[in-house]
Amino acid sequence: MKAFHSNWTAPYLINSSTYEMKDYEILMTILSALKWREKNGSIKMVTDKTGKEYYKKIGIEAIWDLGIECKLDGIYDLVNKEIFWAAGKVYALSMEDGPIAMIDTDFIVWKPLEELIKESSLAVIHREGIDPLVYPDKEYFNLKEGYSFDDAWNWKVEPCNTAFAYFNDKKFIKEYTKAAIVFMENAKVDDNRITNMVFAEQRIISMVAEKMNLKIYEMETIERLLSGKQKRYTHLWGYKSTLNTNEILRRQFCQKLIARIIKEFPEYKSMLMKIEPISTKYNI
């Protein structure tokens, strides 16, 4: 199976003159790509010029066997970069035909997936409940004149978490990404960095799928993912705040990632030793 990571650096550069990644972000990206290649297929990175130059600078281009595609510079002025901080992955998906897996760089798939999802037109890591603070009703949104929501959308259908999503329907990719992009480009956003972004990325996908009578395969339940009982996936998302505030746990976590990369992919040890944010801080 083919897959892609994505990284649109423009939101980061709102408050910084230079782009850089945290140590654990670099290590998770490396392990995510290498594990996918080992267990499931090929993978590429879709980013912008800044992202490509950064990956080249720290020397990790080789982790993506399909290379790095510089395709996201053209969206710089299309949407509000601060509110739609994850818009890059939607635009990246819009340039694909499928079948393709869309994987966040902080998401690792530890085991083969082909038999699990190969017959699915759309598979997502899990569904989400409609928490009104995260997924408000349509009246919440402030929209530009001339834009209106599709009357065929069902606002009661559960959203999809897209930290991992598999797309095997060209028409659906086109319809979903078009709907999400048109919304992002027509939203008069407030200062809420969650509601508008997750609506575009994770709620529209469900509503378009239902409209098209496309069955969504839920790969796991959120309860099992949070319980730690399953061993197929790791998603760092909620743990980032802990790593950002607890240096001891952060060092321990990064050392574990380094050890695992070296143990399972020893040919990449020399690469780790040359990554300045890693080699200057950790004993490799």
Image: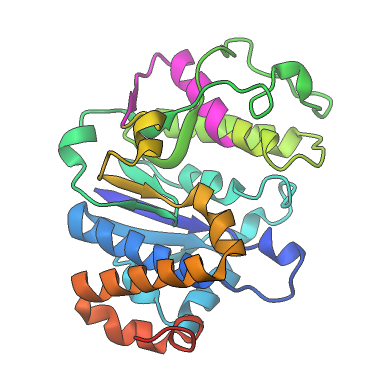
Task: Give the residue displayed 53% in from the left and 36% down from the top.
Answer: 177
Asked if the magenta segment contains residue 237, the reply would be no
Q: Residue at x 75, y 24 (%)?
A: 147
Seen from this angle, which residue lies furthest front? 248
Q: Looking at the image, which residue is at 45% across and 15% down?
A: 210
The answer to whether residue 204 is magenta is yes
Q: How many marks?
A: 0
In the image, what residue occupies the spot 52% across and 19% down? 207
Place of residue 279 in the rendered image (x, y in percent of width and height, measured from the top left): 43, 87
Magenta residues (range): 201-219
Query: Nearest the camera: 57 or 26?
Result: 26
Query: Residue furthest toward the left?
Result: 115
Left or right relative to 21: residue 64: left
> Can residue 170 be seen at all in this image of the molecule?
no
Q: Position of residue 243 (x, y in %)?
A: 54, 62
Q: Nearer the viewer, residue 37 or 276?
A: 276
> Can you say whether 95 is above or below 253 in the image?
above
